[in-house]
Amino acid sequence: MIRRAVRFLDRRAGAAPFVRKTLRYVFPDHWSFLLGEVALYAFVVLVGTGIYLTLFYQDSTEKVTYHGPYEPLRGQEMTEAYRSVLNLSTTVKAGLLMRQTHHWAANVFIAAIVLHLLRIFFTGAYRKPRELTYWLGLTMLLVALLEGYLGYSLADDLLSGMGLAIGYSVALSIPFLGANLAALIWGGPFPGTHDFFARMYVAHVFLIPAAIAVLLTAHLALVALRHHTQFARGARQTERKLVGLPMYPAYAPRSLGLLCAVAGVLFLLGGLAQINPIWLWGPYHTYSSTNGAQPDWYLGWLIGGLRLVPSFDVVIDGYTLVPNPFWGGAAFPLAVFLFLFLWPWLERRLTRDTAYHNLLDRPRDAPGRTAVGIALLTWVFVVFVAGSADRVDVLLGLGYQTQTWVYRVLVFAAPPAAGLVAYRICGELRAGERVERARTRAEREAREAAG
Amino acid sequence: MAKARPSPKDLLIAAVVLLVGRRRPRPRLRGRERIVPQGPPDRRAELVVLALLLGSAGCAAGFVAFYALDRLPNQTQLLGASLGLSLVLLAAALVVTAKRLVVSEELEHDYPAEEHVDEQLTIEQIVDESGDRVTRRRLLRLGAGAAGGALGAALITPAVSLGPVFDMDRFYGTPWRRGRRLVDERGRPYRADEIEEDTLYTAFPEGADREELGSSLVVVRLPTSALRLPRENARFDAAGIVAYSKICTHAGCAISLYRAPLFQPVEPRPALVCPCHYSTFDPARAGAVTFGPAGRKLPMLPIYADGRGILRARGNFDEPVGPSWWGVRLRKPSP
């Protein structure tokens, strides 16, 4: 049976040498290496559930009156897009499960990418010869953020409409291009023409997923061509020798198990944990909004950025040049991504380390990099937390304006402070290890002297 | 000849053999050295995997059953729980298989070579020698650049059809004209005497598209003594009633919060607040920004009450409506 299948494949495709190599491809084992796999499997779930959703979604902004089973919205005017998502959630069997699982999968997808990025950054896995892999991964994160934003914008409920208004304003605020760019995307001033939803739709269900698939393939191909990095856990692991489990039989069931676990947890969440109950938000109109609106977690840093910037536009002689949303909504995330893209090159310049690296650093072994990473993370995190100041105001009664001023100071003060603390901790950890080593050596020598 | 149907006894024997029978498969390719090292059998792990697989199958069957049942309360929860559990049990079966039923041998593998110097040189040579016959390399390169650049530009030109590029007038437009009545959500004109203090009203231009950014208004009444309108905005109010664009000048959200001064010492002035980024505007001072990120004031619409007390626009807004863009001209004269 096996022999016949293998023979068939080899005679048709000449695949035997490739399959043999693949079966014995070696995976080093560490829990943190699974984060990228979690992202990959969340993407699989996204594609699967997403295809199901497309079979029910209408990308039309035609005005209709709702007559469906959900009592509170009956008789309300809404777009066909919103009504189709409402019907999917209320009348299609398993429709709500698929929609909620899709939404959860999007949140987990981006969370896994971010954690994977942190692992790559703090262990120096992006160093030569893996810069291309790292840049492809960063690009995927950028594209995934846009994809998630488009996804929840398509529902055309009140929250997604508010999100689109903000996105429009940020696009409008980009120097030189702004208004023309927004006009091209929306087909005219906000809320745009009917074409706009069709454009978002094709981008969300085809263009961007296809782009992610291509980037993902290249990312994985590069990983396989250069092989995985590894921690130096013993003397066997070196810059030239990779130690790990073969794809078959040891690694395949582990990885398939992870796929099933990720899918299983996502369906459990999709069935048991409510997410984005769009029927509660109601339809969007440009003249309506709601208090306490928060985006999905991965855009929290942008709403924080938009809120923190104090009141100013760059105005010359009665003409606005750079409107305010540019700083928090465009310049801030672009700065973060630009820094991340440039970092491998910057680090090479700073450390003059141009060697090939297959062994990973522990964060403490590269205190400078760890400090920089922690500072950047703190910067983004402070802005992220600032985005939820209104919730803190409601829950804990801390005045919103006071909080905003605190964050405006923290955004400058906290990153260097956190970076310095991280640097010191790295030093202390290494000093502790030196003491430990010296003691074991002394003990051993004492034992040898005695014996 | 008709096939003999298996008797119940045969089926029973088959089941018992399936359940109790154990046999270690011997490697078929005898005489060859083993590649995958040998490991001891683990009967308990086999039983665990079997139980997990059956559990997974049961849950998956449950999913189908929950789907088939009509008028089931909490159907989404049952569907999600059964499908999720089925996958989680399958995951557990796979992990137990990986840890107990297959050999987890650690292999060593050489990292690929850092580079292939010889191949690099060969590639360079092929490319280099292929261009041997060309004598005016630089000129041809310029020509190819011109063709590529122009063709690229030509190919992206149709993208201009996506929107009204270079036509900024449409971004300034609003449906407000002198005499246009302010109506509520049901289309009923607002009378000046029904606008009360400490309340926020949303108004629209009669008969116009409400979704346009230039349409919607927030209308509030302040005591005339509290008004601090600058000279340019003098007489914009209708005896204490002031009207502003409802669209925040920061990021285009609708301004739906009104902080009326309920507690004089803490909240000294009434304020219009946008819930997206908490830009705060002063309705008594022509919509000036008092807090938050908005870079310019809220556009104010001059209004008056006509002979029958109906609120009407006196003209257009004093500033462009909605979020700003590069080159937006403030204080555009109203048409």
Image (tube, coloured by chain):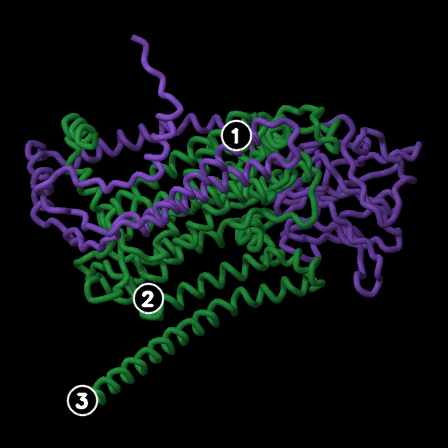
Chain colours: A green, B purple
Please give the name of the residue rendered at 89% of the width and 36% of the height, measured from the top-left corner: B191
Nearest-to-viewer mark from 2 and 3: 3
Local secondary structure at mark 2: loop
Dividing the picture into quarters, in which one does residue A353 lie? Answer: bottom left
Whether residue B8 sits left or right of residue A154 in the image: it is: left
- Choose between A102 and A28: the one closer to the eye: A28
Q: Is residue B126 above or below residue A433?
A: above
User: Which badge, 2 or 3, is on the more N-terminal residue?
Assistant: 2
Q: Chain of mark 3?
A: A
Dividing the picture into quarters, in which one does residue A360 lie? Answer: bottom left
- Choose between A108 and A288: the one closer to the eye: A108
Local secondary structure at mark 3: loop
Are discs 2 and 3 located on one and the same chain? yes
Quadrant, the C terminus of chain A: bottom left
Work out how far the residue at label 2 is from the one at label 1, CA to CA, in angstroms: 48 Å
Q: Position of residue B135 (x, y in %)?
A: 8, 34
Dividing the picture into quarters, in which one does residue A97 lie? Answer: top right
Q: Which residue is mark 3?
A: A451
Q: Chain of mark 2?
A: A
Q: Which residue is mark 2?
A: A362
Q: Chain of mark 1?
A: B
Please give the name of the residue rendered at 51% of the width and 25% of the height, measured from the top-left corner: A55
Count of numbered circles in the view:
3
Q: What residue type is disc 2 on?
A: Arg
Please give the name of the residue rendered at 49% of the width and 54% of the height, measured from the top-left corner: A332
**Label 2: few (<14), some or many (≥20) within 10 Å?**
some
Quadrant, the N terminus of chain A: top left
Q: Position of residue A266 (x, y in %)?
A: 49, 43
**Residue lying farthest to the top in this orientation:** B1
**Label 1: few (<14), some or many (≥20) within 10 Å?**
few
